[in-house]
């Protein structure tokens, strides 16, 4: 028996955004972007540098106002920032003067969560990201990957409807990045978390995502929405196993071909010719 279809969590429709430059000129960052993210799905925004991936994410977060289009989360319009959307950035965002436990409790304290509840909830998510032994450590005593675990735990502890991630593992070394990717899959499998992630890494997108929204070069439009059906409808928290699947290479080559076609340098060389 096939699994019941997931309900739509986030709906992005006709999204466009212009920016005014210092010269007074207006430049279009993204144009007519439409896609859905389903409940407990990881959707990756992928495309060439400067295509507007992070601009789309910031509009979903409420940090940028759309020029046109609509954004709906759980059937309600997005208007400005809200705690139902949790954000994890590439840069480390822990407070240096707070312990891991205090960092994870911080947002809950601002939201008025009672002390005992926020302590227990923080412990749960610290354990979920395998930092129980470092509960009382300060950020200066942690590696980069551990700091990102703190950021993820802190964001999840606030129980957002959707987790927004802007190249969260981009600053990590290769080994730590792959470990963090596998951790994220474990979190998705053990919670009902929904994720919209920006990444520039083709391998990361294929490994993590249920669906990939591939964007064109500037101004960013959707070129293709890809599904990772070759995983057989399941998530595999073992990178070697996924990379070793026969269909993995074909999908990677297809995306690399699109990335090459959308490369700004290709447009430059065509103009020169």
Image: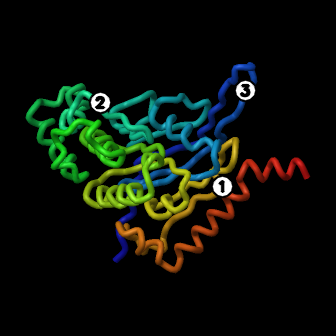
Q: State whether residue 75 appears in this view.
A: no
Which numbered disc flags the more N-terminal residue, 2 or 1?
2
Which numbered disc flags the more N-terminal residue, 1 or 3?
3
Estimate the x, y position of residue 143 in percent, counting from the top left: 32, 46
Q: Nearer the viewer, residue 194 or 137?
A: 137
Residue density around tag 3, few if under 14, some if 14–19, many if 20 or more, within 10 Å: few
The label shown at residue 95 is: 2
Estimate the x, y position of residue 190 in percent, counting from the top left: 25, 59
Q: State whether residue 255 appears in this view.
A: yes
How many angstroms separate mark 2 from mark 1 (CA)? 39 Å
Residue at the spot 73% in from the left edge and 58% down from the top edge: 261
Dot 1 falls on a residue whose secondary structure is strand
Residue at the spot 18% in from the left edge and 51% down from the top edge: 127
Dot 3 falls on a residue whose secondary structure is strand
Residue density around tag 1, few if under 14, some if 14–19, many if 20 or more, within 10 Å: some
Estimate the x, y position of residue 134 in percent, counting from the top left: 19, 45
Residue at the spot 45% in from the left edge and 35% down from the top edge: 61
Q: Nearer the viewer, residue 13 or 269?
A: 269
The residue beneath circle 1 is: 223
Q: Is residue 25 above or below residue 258?
A: above
Residue density around tag 2, few if under 14, some if 14–19, many if 20 or more, within 10 Å: some
The label shown at residue 26 is: 3
- Where, by quadrant of the figure, is residue 56 drawn? top right
- Where, by quadrant of the figure, is residue 176 drawn? bottom left
Q: Is residue 71 above or below residue 114?
A: below
- Where, by quadrant of the figure, is residue 225 drawn? bottom right
């Amino acid at each position: 028996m096939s699994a019941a279809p997931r309900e739509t969590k986030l709906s992005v429709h006709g999204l466009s955004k212009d920016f005014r430059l210092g010269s007074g000129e207006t430049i279009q960052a993204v144009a007519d972007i439409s896609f859905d993210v389903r409940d407990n799905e990881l959707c990756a925004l992928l495309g060439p540098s400067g295509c507007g991936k992070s601009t789309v994410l910031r509009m979903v977060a409420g940090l940028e106002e759309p020029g046109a289009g609509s954004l709906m989360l759980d059937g309600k319009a997005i208007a400005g920032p809200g705690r139902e959307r949790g954000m994890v950035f590439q840069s480390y965002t822990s407070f240096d003067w707070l312990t891991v436990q205090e960092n994870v409790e911080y947002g809950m304290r601002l939201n008025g969560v009672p002390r005992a509840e926020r302590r227990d909830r923080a412990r749960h998510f610290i354990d979920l990201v395998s930092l129980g032994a470092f509960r009382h450590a300060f950020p200066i005593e942690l590696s980069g990957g551990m700091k990102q675990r703190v950021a993820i735990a802190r964001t999840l502890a606030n129980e957002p409807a959707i987790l927004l991630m802007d190249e969260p593992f981009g600053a990590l070394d290769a080994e730590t990045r792959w470990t963090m990717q596998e951790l994220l899959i474990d979190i998705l499998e053990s919670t009902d978390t929904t994720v919209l992630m920006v990444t520039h890494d083709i391998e990361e997108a294929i490994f993590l995502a249920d669906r990939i929204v591939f964007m064109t070069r500037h101004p960013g439009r959707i070129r293709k929405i890809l599904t990772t059906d070759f995983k057989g409808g399941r998530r595999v928290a073992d990178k070697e196993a996924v990379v070793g699947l026969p269909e993995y290479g074909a999908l990677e080559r297809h995306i690399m071909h699109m990335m090459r076609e959308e490369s700004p340098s290709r447009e430059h060389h065509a103009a020169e010719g």
